[in-house]
Amino acid sequence: DTGVSQDPRHKITKRGQNVTFRCDPISEHNRLYWYRQTLGQGPEFLTYFQNEAQLEKSRLLSDRFSAERPKGSFSTLEIQRTEQGDSAMYLCASSFGTRGYEQFFGPGTRLTVL
Amino acid sequence: AQRVTQPEKLLSVFKGAPVELKCNYSYSGSPELFWYVQYSRQRLQLLLRHISRESIKGFTADLNKGETSFHLKKPFAQEEDSAMYYCAQGSNTGKLIFGQGTTLQVKP
């Protein structure tokens, strides 16, 4: 399968715990994006990388959130001290270029914070 | 701030009827606009983008700068068109700004 993959697909955690999600983009794609989607809403941008550089972060990304893409390949998104409001679907997407290029989405990681 | 509005949460039509999913954007420059679709139990995927002016699965969308709209249309809906549709605007940095989505339900 050459598409974008995400792991885990589902995560249930207790409030206050830390969680980490992984995204593996399509191999030749240099752009990687993270979005968050809550029930009844469209995906909202969180952050993106060009190769290993994190170039933009949304105001939605509080200091409890951190993302990395250490070698310009896979990326991780960590949430520290999770809150119930963090419950959402976390989507990863990758693209070959920037403006106007198709973004290919992964299946998402559904996070439930109890 | 850039914003994309999809005024209808749900659009229900009968098979063979015309479909129009509405999308309005807020951007004064030259926007990059997309329609993404999510079928049941599948991932979000690109349906079409305005720059390529293509027709995919019978769907078309025309950019109207005067009305800042990018409505998605299909003359004859099929049951397999039932899905969630998202209009999205691309920013200068490449990130996508999505609308809230419209569920299209095509009844037999």
Image: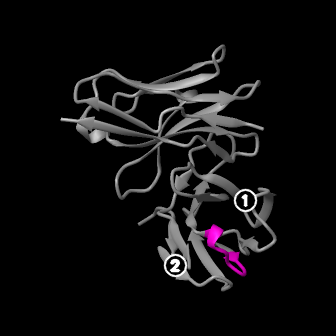
Would residue B88 be counted in the magenta stretch? no
Residue located at (53% from left, 74% from top): A112
Depth check: give the residue in front, A30 or B43.
Answer: B43
Q: Decide: few, some or many residues near mark 1? Use Cα within 10 Å; few <14, some 14-19, many ≥20.
A: many
Range of magenta residues: A78-86
Report which quarter residue A100 is drawn in: top right
Which numbered disc covers residue A11? 2
The amino acid type found where label 1 is placed reads: Thr
Where's residue B17, x and y in %? 27, 23
**In the picture, which quadrant includes the C terminus of chain B?**
top left
Q: Identify the mark nearer the N-term, 2 or 1.
A: 2
In the rendered image, residue B10, in percent from the top left (x then y), is placed at: 41, 38
- Element assignment for label 1: strand
Residue A21 appears at what percent x and percent y? 60, 76
- Mark whose residue sits in front, 2 or 1: 2
Q: Is B49 on the left or on the right of B17, as rendered? A: right
Q: Which amino acid does label 2 sit on?
A: Lys
Dot 1: chain letter: A
Residue located at (26% from left, 41% from top):
B80
Number of numbered discs: 2
Pointer 1: what residue? A47
